[in-house]
């Protein structure tokens, strides 16, 4: 069959959850047997979010093929358990870069290059790449930003043009909007939704379905009113009420029959019911835990939880797998020092030291790891967290008092962490790190090997600095083992301390591959170690 397209736009305000609605719809369609993928179009001029501060944009999500992308792609993978790629995230910066390159190469035959048709043509080309691959029955396209924003106009216009080219039953537009509750008046208000739909209509796009975020249930009268003023069928006014966890949203959307309405408009069969048994089993474990642990997340961007989005979600997956409620406490590494560590750590059953860049808060991370190592508290270090574990061990066990990373001290004489050889000639910042999936060979008998249950693994990376192999034998002599090595370049990927209850540091980002259907084994084992430590 021809690929069908679903476009998801947002109105009234940002952060309504287009990514979660898109992922939930995709999950329902996938559970009915359809091959589905989701792509995100972001209206900012950065080519990708790789150079953005986490405070500005939250986590930068990395795909197997090395794309630095929007964190919504993480939601897509966690819900669908299907890898995304470079093609699943497009920014205005990438679109304009392509158009300008084309102009410089003379591909427009002397034409005056304009937003319409050249920019909108490029947007449409990217909107249909995944559909034309033949790998998917349905492609869901989430448009970032809010309808009415000047940055969003080319995307809305591209949807208008593309809908004209497609058959009437080959595309659907879903508009996510807000129905605010005025406490003083004691009622829900539909006017913001009406105005948002008017904005969309002014751009030439009629939404087929309205998904209404709300804190209170929509009455039949309100649904009728929205249907009347926004020119959509009453059964296409979908309530999206607040829930305890984002993983409930597919079930609330199923109850509202969002997937049925979409399939009806696309003229696709609804005869096969959605099989969500495994999803419901996950939710049951999540809501009815047998254990409870307190885990600390030590990082430098903790004021914004989205900076560690994939780590937060990986703990939810691993917690459910262990039938355990994970209480995650975010601790700012700048606020940690030797004098207050005992107080900060006393109620924690395990600690993860998070990724990051730069020297701010680095000594707090190193002091934390020393405390965890000496007091036999389960430790998990990711990327910079692993590098800090190496620095701490070198200073306090091996006697290299000035051990450091050249990222923090470029003149370090004891650089146990150093700039990768392949990075030494790199001057541009954007998209130039060691990115994407690389192989790692695990040592049999190690904790990591036990977790994965196999020797050869593949994990995603995002870093410039590496373990300095010049010191490897000295580390192993003192009791820190390199149990994971990249078979192609001998890069140390995993370090462990065998005589510690659970001390594991990894250079890669395991959180990026944790999904509801496949919780990441290292997170599962770490939570299990925290449970054992609490006992």
Image (cartoon, grey):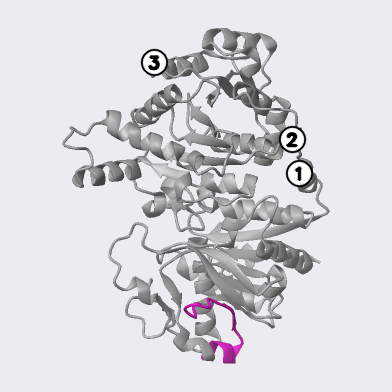
The local secondary structure at tag 2 comes to: loop
The local secondary structure at tag 3 comes to: helix
Picture coordinates of residue 509, whole percent (x, y): 54, 62
Tell me the quadrant of the picture where the C terminus can be found.
bottom right
Q: Which residue is mark 2?
A: 274
Q: Which residue is mark 3?
A: 202
Question: Does 283 appear above or below 474?
Answer: above
Say the numbered circle drawn on residue 405. Answer: none
Does the magenta-highlighted stretch encompass residue 475?
yes
Residue in view at x 34 percent, y 32 percent: 120
- For marks 2 and 1, the one nearer the N-term is 2
Name the quadrant containing residue 345: bottom right
The local secondary structure at tag 1 comes to: helix
Q: Which residue is mark 1?
A: 283
Residue in view at x 52 percent, y 30 percent: 8
Picture coordinates of residue 477, whole percent (x, y): 58, 92
| Residue extending farthest right | 290
Question: Does 403 appear above or below 90?
Answer: below
Q: Left or right of 531: which side holds 189?
A: left
2 and 1 marks in contact (CB < 8 Å): no
Q: Left or right of 412: which side holds 461?
A: right
- For marks 3 and 2, the one nearer the N-term is 3
Instruction: Determine crowd level at label 2: few under 14, some 14-19, many 20+ residues with C-alpha closer than 10 A.
Output: some
Q: CA distance from mark 3 to mark 1?
A: 42 Å
| Residue extending farthest front | 1
Instruction: Determine crowd level at label 1: few under 14, some 14-19, many 20+ residues with C-alpha closer than 10 A.
Output: some
Residue in view at x 45 percent, y 35 percent: 144
């Amino acid at each position: 069959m021809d690929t069908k397209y679903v476009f998801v736009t947002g109105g009234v305000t940002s952060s309504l959850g287009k990514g979660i609605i898109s992922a939930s719809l995709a999950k329902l369609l996938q559970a009915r047997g359809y091959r589905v993928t989701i792509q995100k179009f972001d209206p900012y001029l950065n080519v990708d979010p790789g150079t953005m501060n986490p405070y500005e944009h939250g986590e930068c999500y990395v795909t197997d093929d090395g794309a630095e992308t929007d964190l919504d792609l993480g939601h897509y993978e966690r819900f669908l358990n299907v890898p995304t790629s470079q093609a699943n995230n497009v920014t205005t910066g990438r679109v304009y870069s392509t158009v300008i390159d084309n102009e410089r190469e003379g591909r427009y035959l002397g034409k005056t290059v304009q937003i319409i048709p050249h920019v909108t043509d490029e947007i449409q080309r990217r909107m249909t790449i995944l559909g034309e691959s033949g790998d998917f029955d349905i492609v869901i396209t989430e448009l970032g930003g809010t309808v009415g924003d000047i940055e969003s106009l080319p995307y809305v216009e591209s949807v208008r043009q593309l809908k004209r080219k497609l058959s009437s039953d080959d595309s659907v537009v879903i508009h996510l909007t807000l129905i605010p509750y005025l406490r003083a008046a004691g009622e829900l208000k539909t006017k913001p939704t009406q105005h948002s739909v008017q904005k969309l209509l002014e751009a030439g796009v009629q939404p087929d379905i309205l998904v209404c975020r709300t804190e209170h249930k929509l009455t039949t009268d309100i649904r009728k009113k929205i249907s009347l003023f926004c020119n959509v069928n009453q059964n296409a006014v979908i309530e999206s009420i607040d829930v305890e966890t984002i993983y409930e949203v597919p079930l609330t959307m199923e109850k509202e029959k969002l997937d049925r309405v979409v399939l009806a408009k696309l003229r696709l069969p609804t005869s096969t019911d959605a099989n969500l048994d495994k999803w419901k089993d996950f939710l049951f474990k999540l809501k009815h835990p047998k254990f409870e642990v307190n885990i600390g997340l030590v990082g430098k961007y903790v004021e914004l939880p989205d900076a560690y989005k994939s780590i937060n979600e990986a703990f939810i997956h691993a917690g459910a797998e262990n039938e355990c409620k994970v209480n995650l406490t975010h601790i700012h590494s700048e606020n940690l020092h030797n004098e207050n560590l005992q107080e900060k750590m006393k109620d924690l059953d395990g600690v993860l030291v998070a990724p990051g860049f730069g020297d701010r808060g680095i000594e707090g991370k190193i002091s934390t790891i020393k405390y965890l190592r000496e007091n036999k508290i389960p430790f998990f270090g990711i990327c910079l967290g692993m590098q800090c574990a190496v620095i701490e061990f070198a200073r306090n066990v091996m006697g290299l008092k000035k051990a450091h990373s050249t990222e923090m001290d470029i003149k370090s004489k004891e650089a146990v962490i150093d700039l990768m050889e392949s990075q030494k000639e790199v001057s541009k910042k954007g998209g130039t790190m060691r990115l994407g999936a690389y192989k790692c060979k695990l040592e049999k008998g190690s904790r990591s090997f036990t977790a994965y249950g196999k020797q050869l693994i593949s994990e995603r990376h995002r870093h410039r600095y590496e373990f300095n192999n010049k010191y490897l034998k000295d580390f192993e002599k003192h009791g820190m083992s390199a149990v994971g090595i990249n078979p192609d370049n001998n890069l140390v990927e995993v370090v462990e301390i065998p005589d510690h209850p659970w001390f594991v540091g990894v250079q890669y980002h395991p959180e990026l591959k944790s999904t509801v259907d496949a919780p990441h084994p290292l997170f599962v084992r770490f939570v299990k170690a925290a449970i054992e430590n609490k006992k």
